[in-house]
Image: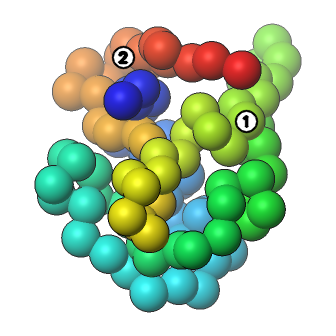
Amino acid sequence: MDIIFLPHIAYDVVKEALGSLIHVQWADGSSVGLDFCFHEKRSLNSIFSALTFHFKEGDYIVIECNYLLDTGNGIICLAMALNMKPDVWKLEGLHD
């Protein structure tokens, strides 16, 4: 499982933005160690688009399969977690 680690402020912004856009039945993601999960039967690419991080020097676009995790049992989770070192961004394991 690939996870994007974000500083607290960025993580909260992403969770708040996604939470305001989707109206779903929330799910427990503790079995995969994630806290923003919901029930969804449709495929990821049919309901979500790319997520864009806006930086001073340019944008970083993350496609849905790199920021959402389909657990395989009808639960999708935000594949992001808090980075405990708030001054370091860690974007790893991303794939096309």
Q: Is residue 12 visible?
A: no
Tell me the kind of residue under disc 1.
Answer: Ile
Q: Quadrant of the C terminus?
A: top right
Disc on res. 77:
none
Query: As rendered, which of 69 and 20 lies closer to the eye?
Result: 69
Q: Position of residue 88 (x, y in %)?
A: 38, 13
Query: As rendered, which of 61 and 75 lies closer to the eye?
Result: 75
Crowding around mark 1 (Cα neighbors within 10 Å: few <14, some 14 to 19, many 20+) is some
Disc on res. 87:
2
Q: Secondary structure at mark 1?
A: loop
Above-or-below relation of 2 to 71: above
Seen at 63% across and 77% down, the residue is 22
Q: Residue furthest right?
A: 58
Q: Earlier in the sequence, mark 2 or mark 1?
A: 1
Q: Is residue 43 visible?
A: yes
Crowding around mark 2 (Cα neighbors within 10 Å: few <14, some 14 to 19, many 20+) is few
Badges 2 and 1: C-beta atoms under 8 Å apart?
Answer: no
Q: Residue tagged by mark 1?
A: 63
Tell me the kind of residue under disc 2.
Answer: Asp
Give the image quarter of residue 58.
Answer: top right
Seen at 36% across and 17% down, the residue is 87
Q: Quadrant of the N terminus?
A: top left
Query: As rendered, which of 26 and 44 lies closer to the eye?
Result: 44
